[in-house]
Amino acid sequence: MSATIADTIYQALSERIITGSLPAGEKLRQDHIAREFAASHVPVREALLRLEAHGLAVSEPRRGTRVSALNPAEIREVIEMRVSLEVLALTHAFPRLSQEDIVAADAARLACDAAEDMASWERLNRAFHQVILAPCAMPRLLSAISDLHIAAARHLFANWQHQWTRRADSDHAAIVQAMARRDAAGACEILRRHLRRVR
């Protein structure tokens, strides 16, 4: 039972950190969090450890756990790593692609296009990338990519929140079309260009 409470706490806090409603340096007080979620300290500690593992929080002796600082220089590294690792995952996904995977990718694309606000869009955009890469069936690779998505999302909110507008993502559509054609090289090239555009 405590795992599901820890999941809920982790999801809620990570969302707040990513969107900037919990700013860098903010103290994450165990007792306040436990009260808010009507939970014991055990799942709270577990959630805080997960935030640290994903680079969203830092723990300092005698100072407790705080939201980690955002380093603007990091975004270039994050993008380059995403390009390398996501293209690698997509390459390995292609030989295992089923019709269900393509249908799921198209549904994820449409959901992302329909997002009404930046927080929903960012969550659904991440989901789209996870759906197209999941067939690679390489858990360590997918876990590393998931951490990069979290880092990229924080930078996105810090820098682009006020410029976000709802739009259909033509790159996502082109990737799904390439998946349907079984065109691995084409899909990887579109993905590479799509990720580099963030800069």
Image (tube, grey):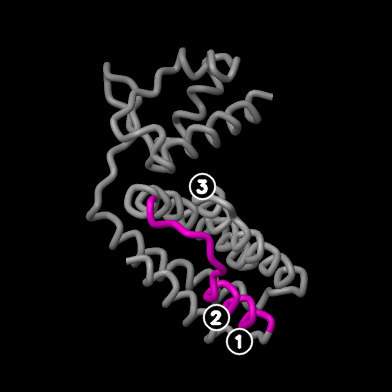
Q: Quadrant of residue 3?
A: top right
Residue under pointer 1: 183
Residue occupying the point 31% across, 35% down: 24
Distance between the Cα atoms at labels 1 and 2?
6 Å
Distance between the Cα atoms at labels 3 and 2?
26 Å
Residue occupying the point 63% across, 62% down: 131
Q: Secondary structure at mark 3?
A: helix
* Secondary structure mostly taken by the magenta-highlighted segment of the chain: helix
Q: Residue flagged by tag 2: what amino acid is it? A: Ala
Q: Secondary structure at mark 1?
A: loop
Q: Quadrant of residue 152?
A: bottom left
Near mark 2 (Cα within 10 A), the count class, few <14, some 14-19 or many ≥20, is: many
**Numbered circle sitting on residue 187:** 2
In reply to whether residue 173 is colored magenta, the answer given is yes
**Numbered circle sitting on residue 3:** none
Q: Is residue 89 above or below residue 125?
A: below
Sooner in the amino-acid sequence: mark 1 or mark 3: 3
Residue under pointer 3: 119
Q: Are marks 1 and 2 in contact (CB under 8 Å)?
A: yes
Left or right: residue 34 compared with residue 74: right
Residue occupying the point 59% across, 16% down: 39
Sooner in the amino-acid sequence: mark 3 or mark 2: 3
What is the quadrant of the C terminus in the image? bottom left
Residue 122 in the image: state x and y as whole percent: 51, 53
Q: Residue flagged by tag 3: what amino acid is it? A: Ala
Range shown magenta:
162-180
Q: Quadrant of residue 57?
A: top left
Q: Residue flagged by tag 1: what amino acid is it? A: Asp
